[in-house]
Image (cartoon, rainbow, N blue to C red):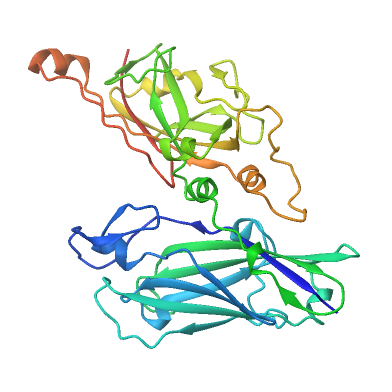
Amino acid sequence: MWYLVQFFFVALVSTSFSSGDNVEDNLINAEDEFGRDLSLLEARYRIERPVFKYETLQFDLDYVVSDFMGDNFITYQIYDGHLCREGNNDITNNTYLAPRLRPDLKALGDGTGNRTMKLTLNIDPDEITSTSIFEDLETYANVYFCVRFNVHNMNYFEPQAIEVNFREVPVLLTINLVDGFSIDLGQVSDTDLVVELAYEDSAVEAYICDTDSNIINGDVRNQGESIRVCVTPTAETLAQGAYLRYIDEFTFQREEHLQVAIEPGNGGEAANELTVVSCVPGALVCAFETLLGAEFFADGVGIVYGYGTAFLQFGQEDEAATSGRRLQSDRLSAEELLAARPTAFGFEIVSIPVENEFASGTPVLATFSSATLLGIVCVYILMG
């Protein structure tokens, strides 16, 4: 007989919005869970952090979405582990969790109102013990799975339908294998903000810098000059106690020309002698300096794109969890989730060719932004 079930979940969210509608990007009286103002377009496709409810063997995740969402704008998937869609198998059509989506009966609106979508899981205590998500540890058992909740811009079965936003919720059930059955609501944990920001690729930022990690505003690259890039946690991430562990990868690209500065999966080491990396676990700022190859300057003025990822850790100790750490423990920690997946970073620099600058007297300007999903660097370069 089963006695105690403990629930733990961490909600992971994408913040990429797109739609076929022509909607003015005006701010409305709405905020997301981090207190950021939302435009009407963003409000239409938002997904709020799910609320957990339970009753005997039935578990509910209540998702609040906008009233722009029709019933068929919503889909969900279940995966057999905490890496969700990126690293686990789809087990949505199962009978041991028996997932079912139950929309409310509210009328549709323009996106300024709310609807609640209830995802119900009914656990079969006999069948689940023989599945891959059940880990028997003699006196207790762990059950690992992930719920991915998606919103689309139209009915999901339409050929033109696009997945606009999603949340991934890794779930851990800890079950004591003793007589009776009860649930301790006190074991439910809130989302860790750093993990959420890391998984939505908005936890770190990057910028062109000098050797003292100061921002360089306005920069033109000529053949033979190096580019130094600094990477640091955002203020929001740093306030939660997260620091850099290492830069996992970075690649520069101009048209068909590629130059890897840091190889992925190599512990943050430079790919070759054209890059020098300066980073220690627990650093506030990590940096790398790269000398671009001659092919990046062969065709005169152009744009170089770059994309990279970095791992975060909590605190500044060297003994942080490693990326190879197994996700098989009595409680999946936020540290382990950070170690399981790097977060993307990027920035954009607009630079003006030197001859145009002197001819017009126009000041050199640089615009910085955090590129959340793709982590893009844009640099104008000049032929030497």
Q: Which residue lies furthest to the left in this view?
A: 360
Foreground residue among 5 and 88: 5
Foreground residue among 30 and 43: 30
The N terminus lies in which quarter of the figure? Answer: bottom right
User: Where residue 294 sits: x, y (%)?
Assistant: 43, 18
Q: Is residue 295 above or below residue 40?
A: above
Is 28 situated left or right of 142 in this image? Answer: left
Residue lying at 60% horizontally and 22% vertically, measured from the top left: 270
Q: In this view, does 345 lie above or below 226?
A: below
Foreground residue among 66 and 350: 66
Is 233 situated left or right of 378 in this image? Answer: right
User: Where residue 348 sits: x, y (%)?
Assistant: 33, 33
The C terminus lies in which quarter of the figure? Answer: top left
Q: Hey, which quadrant is residue 376 in on the image?
A: top left
User: Where residue 278 sits: x, y (%)?
Assistant: 56, 18
Residue lying at 42% horizontally and 85% vertically, measured from the top left: 104
On the question of residue 215 being in view, the answer is yes
Q: Hey, which quadrant is residue 146 in on the image?
A: bottom right
Q: In this view, does 43 lie above or below 241?
A: below
Residue lying at 28% horizontally and 21% vertically, measured from the top left: 217
Q: Residue furthest right?
A: 138
User: Where residue 317 sits: x, y (%)?
Assistant: 66, 28
Q: Residue furthest bottom?
A: 105
